Amino acid sequence: MLKSYPSDLTDAEWQLIEPLLPAKSAIGHPRDVQLREIVNAIFYVQREGCTWRGLPSDFPPWQTVYGYLRLWQKLGVWQQVHDALRTQLRQAVGKKPQAMAGIIDSQSVKTTEKRGRCTALMSPSTPKDASDLC
């Protein structure tokens, strides 16, 4: 029995995600890891903020986990999972599958054609006092 972590998928979460992951390939080396453990390991690294080499040894090897992550990023699997889960959630709460409108608030999106009173400095020198920043 593998150790469980707070970042692990529940059975219900896994049932939602599993069909969205790529199926086994008919060619090539047979898969010798469970995709659920791969996803759990990816979520562990994300939640804990550890390095790949810091992945606990009860997960598959970090190189394998990282390889799946990169492959799924290249194939767009993560975006497909995100989109499918968002659609399922919207339907579950009685909304249309896709949003019909978007709102951009002028307080959230700042676009200015003129420089403000203060500008950021890219120089490695340290200002003498706060008035040097403006």
Image (cartoon, rainbow, N blue to C red):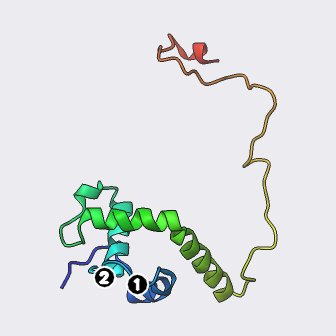
Name which quarter of the figure residue 114 lies in: top right
Residue nearest the viewer, comparing 68 with 50: 68
Residue nearest the viewer, comparing 67 with 53: 67
Residue 44 visible: no
- Residue 73 x/y as whole percent: 49, 64
Q: Residue at x 74, y 26 (%)?
A: 116
Residue reaching furthest to the top: 128
User: Badge 2: how crowded within 10 Å, few (<14), some, or many (20+)?
Assistant: few
Secondary structure found at label 2? loop
- Residue 67 x/y as whole percent: 35, 64
- Residue 103 x/y as whole percent: 79, 61
Task: Check the image and report above or below for 41 versus 25.
Answer: above
Q: Residue at x 29, y 54 (%)?
A: 51
- Position of 126 with respect to 31 (left or right) is right
- Amino acid type, label 1: Lys
Figure quadrant of the C terminus: top right
Secondary structure found at label 1? loop
Name the residue tied to disc 2: 30
User: Badge 1: how crowded within 10 Å, few (<14), some, or many (20+)?
Assistant: few
Q: CA distance from mark 2 to mark 1?
A: 8 Å
Name the residue tied to disc 1: 24
Figure quadrant of the N terminus: bottom left
Q: Residue at x 25, y 78 (%)?
A: 4
- Residue 68 x/y as whole percent: 38, 68
Residue 26 visible: yes
Look at the numbered discs 2 and 1 and tell me whether their residues touch, using CB distance below 8 Å: yes
Task: Check the image and report above or below for 91 versus 128.
Answer: below
Name which quarter of the figure residue 33 lies in: bottom left
